[in-house]
Image (cartoon, rainbow, N blue to C red):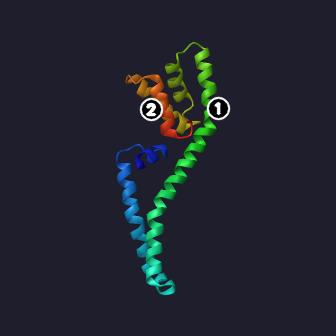
Amino acid sequence: MIKQRLVRAGYRNESAVKVFYGAKVLVPLGLALTVTVTGLVSLVGPLFAYVAALGVGFLAPDFWLGRKIKKRQKHITRGLPDVLDLLVICVEAGLSLDQATARTAEELYHAQPELCDELGVTVLEQRAGRPRTEAWRNLAERTGSLA
């Protein structure tokens, strides 16, 4: 589940899961240390201050990841018309769908990097022998905004 969310946010490295879980440990500890150093403990009581710091710190990486996913999905959704237009133009010019996808991923990379990055992964999947329908279905699952 968390790996899929990280992929939707654009983090495909194997270390991304470790970094995320590390953040879920270190952020609460950092907030607890901040509460201690700033003297907030004496204002609201130690139990409430530390429980609030640990709770907020534990949930903060999830909220951050959710915002990253939504932002990336928004960019992908906004870039979809341009990508589809170029795909249609390439296919009408005589390229196969696989070649048109590769060409679109190359040509629009600077304008739509998130979507073209995902199209590049789709092209690589197809070149590796994965059926086209499965590769495009994986694209929809990875982005979460095309399904």
Left of 27 or right of it: where is 88?
A: right
The kind of residue on which mark 2 rests is Val
Q: Mark 1 points at which residue?
A: 81
Q: What element carries label 1?
A: helix
Provide residue 31's location: percent of width, then percent of height.
44, 71
In the depicted structure, whether residue 23 falls above or below residue 75? below
Outermost residue, top side: 94
The kind of residue on which mark 1 rests is Pro
In the depicted structure, whether residue 7 falls above or below residue 53? above
In the depicted structure, whether residue 130 falls above or below residue 116? above
Q: Mark 2 points at which residue?
A: 121
Density class for disc 2 (Cα within 10 Å; few <14, some 14-19, many ≥20) is: some
Q: Quadrant of the C terminus?
A: top right
Nearer the N terminus, badge 2 or badge 1?
A: 1
Count up the numbered dots: 2
Provide residue 143's location: percent of width, then percent of height.
51, 39
Give the residue displayed 44% in from the left and 64% down from the top: 58
Give the residue displayed 52% in from the left and 24% down from the top: 101
State the CA–CA distance, disc 2 to disc 1: 19 Å
Left of 31 or right of it: where is 75?
A: right
**In-front residue for pair 45/121:** 45
Give the residue displayed 46% in from the left and 59% down from the top: 61
Provide residue 78's location: percent of width, then percent of height.
63, 39
Give the residue displayed 38% in from the left and 49% down from the top: 16
Among the 4 quarters of the image, the one containing residue 35: bottom left
**In-front residue for pair 125/145:** 145
Density class for disc 1 (Cα within 10 Å; few <14, some 14-19, many ≥20) is: few
Provide residue 66's location: percent of width, then percent of height.
52, 53
Q: Is mark 2 on a helix, strand or loop?
A: helix
